[in-house]
Image (cartoon, grey):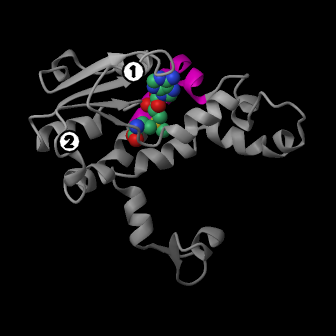
Amino acid sequence: MKVLAMEGVFVASGDDVYHLNTLSRLLLQGRISPGVMLATTPQFVGSAMHLGQWFQSQSEDTTAFMMANGGHSPYASTSLDLEFNSLFNQTMAADSRFAADLVVGDCGEVLKGIGSLVDVAGGTGTMARAIAKAFPHIKCSVLDLPQVIQGISPADNNNNVQFIAGDMMEFIPPAHGILLKVILLLSIAACIN
Ligand SMILES: C[S@@+](CC[C@H](N)C(=O)[O-])C[C@H]1O[C@@H](n2cnc3c(N)ncnc32)[C@H](O)[C@@H]1O
């Protein structure tokens, strides 16, 4: 708690007494809390515990995460562990809720003239739903891995948002616009690994 207080996550007031501040209040809200839960899963905490071993390893085809998780990448792990998959998807959706307001508000200009859009690796579709709601003339689709798309209710597949299970390395549905949010860097890392 002392370290967290020094980092500005809590306010220390007296011996072993701590108060919430703006940051810790945010962490408790639904918008961010799944991320805190994800960061503290054995999968991710275990990765931190393997950093030293990974730094010293000569192998180029492994990561600290893989070392801690039986050789599985994060996305292999989401396909194997339902709870981890659900937490991962909730975290991505929470992050997207922040960005969605910005994209449909201040950045709406970018979407001008676009009639269809595919959110590649778009998770559970938070961003695509927000775009389709704000710009009903844009037909949106969301491509993501089967373990993510299988959690989408059939009722959520409608005229304005279509969900497609697949591997973006093999196929990207055609559309006027392609949205890649928090994905390229991770994909490059996955290819290298
Ligand atoms: C960091 S999350 C970003 C999700 C979303 N774009 C967002 O910003 O919230 C990465 C997403 O990429 C998906 N993903 C990873 N590899 C993929 C692949 N080969 N094909 C399709 N989706 C993939 C994951 O399932 C996950 O939903």
Numbered circle sitting on residue 172: 1
Q: Is residue 83 visible?
A: no
Task: Judge whether residue 75 is colored magenta.
Answer: yes
Query: Which image quadrant for residue 138?
Result: top left
Query: Which image quadrant for residue 47?
Result: top right
The answer for how far apart the CA atoms under marks 1 and 2 are is: 21 Å
Which dot, 1 or 2, sits closer to the camera?
1
**Amino acid type, callout 2:** Ala
Q: Is residue 56 above or below residue 61?
A: below
Task: Judge whether residue 183 is colored magenta.
Answer: no
Q: What percent of the width, then of the height, locates residue 187?
A: 56, 33
Label 2's element? helix
For this orientation, the residue located farthest to the left is: 136
Look at the image and tell me in which quarter the C terminus lies: top right
For the record, the magenta segment spans 74-89
Depth order, front residue of 133/174:
174
Residue in the picture at 19% in, 37% down: 114
Q: Residues within 10 Å of mark 1 (few under 14, many from 20)?
A: some
**Amino acid type, callout 1:** Ile
How many numbered markers are drawn?
Answer: 2
Residue in the picture at 25% in, 50% down: 110
The residue singled out by tag 2 in the image is 130
Q: What percent of the width, then of the height, locates residue 25?
A: 38, 65
Depth order, front residue of 142/94:
142
Look at the image and tell me in which quarter the N terminus lies: bottom right
Q: What percent of the width, then of the height, locates residue 165?
A: 37, 15
Mark 1 touching mark 2, by CB under 8 A? no
Label 1's element? loop
Depth order, front residue of 172/151:
172
Q: Earlier in the sequence, mark 1 or mark 2?
A: 2
